[in-house]
Amino acid sequence: MPLSHIRQIVIGRRLPTSAHAEERLTRASGLAVLSSDALSSVAYATQEALLVLVVAGTSSSILGWSVPISGAIVLLLGIVILSYRQTIRAYPQGGGSYIVAHENLGLYPGLVAGASLMIDYILTVAVSISAGVDNLTSALPILRPYIVDVCLVFIVLLTLANLRGVKESGRIFMVPTYAFIFSIFVLIGTGFYQQLTGHVDPVHHRQEPCTLPQNHLASS
């Protein structure tokens, strides 16, 4: 089988520049593509914030910082939504971070905005994939020795999905995006149901006494 045929099967046929207008996203597929940052933050940001707080201590005063941290994240998302709405009204034909910053602030702010966006894309893929694989290996411990390999496989699949074009990749990302949104509502609904029916048992933490190792006691 020739290489060009394999390439067409994997990433699809080449599209001319004139077909750019046809590569439009519907509202359903656009949500799956454009909301990936916010959804990925919902998926792992809370867990990562709690892990950092647990390192600082397990007292209620330390873990209580999770509430203001969540509030700051919600405030940031609100600012992003307002910014997007203003950008859409000012640039109805489309305007990215570089275009908006360059036309309103100048060349160097535009370059900074474009560079920061590229760094954000790289970090989003790295952190999202690593967090997802960490959850996957916690459910399937047999994959734990192959964490790096599984991460690389998912990065390759994500790359191939994006290479298939905006329209087709939007259709691909619709499945995990809406499945995740549905699972979040199921999780919240189940938690409220368990709480209202009294099926949530309180967890009592017992303070373990501080003990020194035996070899330390012997040397004393």
Image (tube, rainbow, N blue to C red):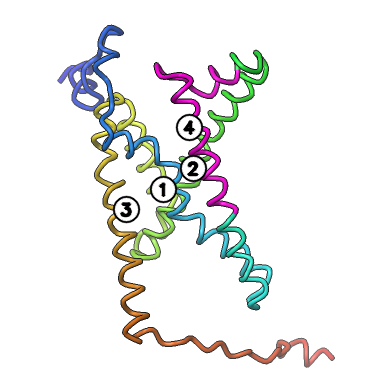
> How far is the residue under mark 4 from the one under mark 1?
16 Å
For label 1, the crowd category at 10 Å Cα-Cα, with few meaning under 14, some 14 to 19 and many 20 or more, is: some
Alpha carbon separation for disc pair 2 and 3? 21 Å
> Quick one: label 3 or label 4, which is nearer the N terminus?
4
Q: Is residue 63 above or below residue 75?
A: below
Image side of residue 217 versus residue 1, left or right: right
**N-term mark: 2 or 3:** 2
Q: Is residue 14 left or right of residue 73?
A: left
Q: Quadrant of residue 18?
A: top left
The furthest residue to the left: 1
Residue type beneath disc 4 = Tyr
Which is nearer the N-term, disc 2 or disc 4? 4
Q: Secondary structure at mark 2?
A: helix
Q: Amino acid at mark 2?
A: Ala
Q: Which mark is residue 84?
A: 4
Residue range (magenta): 72-101
Contact, CB < 8 Å: mark 1 with mark 3? yes
Secondary structure at numbered mark 4: helix
Q: Nearer the viewer, mark 2 or mark 1?
A: 1
> Distance between the Cα atoms at labels 1 and 3?
8 Å
Nearest to viewer (mark 3 / mark 4): 4
Main SS, magenta residues: helix
Q: Which residue is mark 3?
A: 181
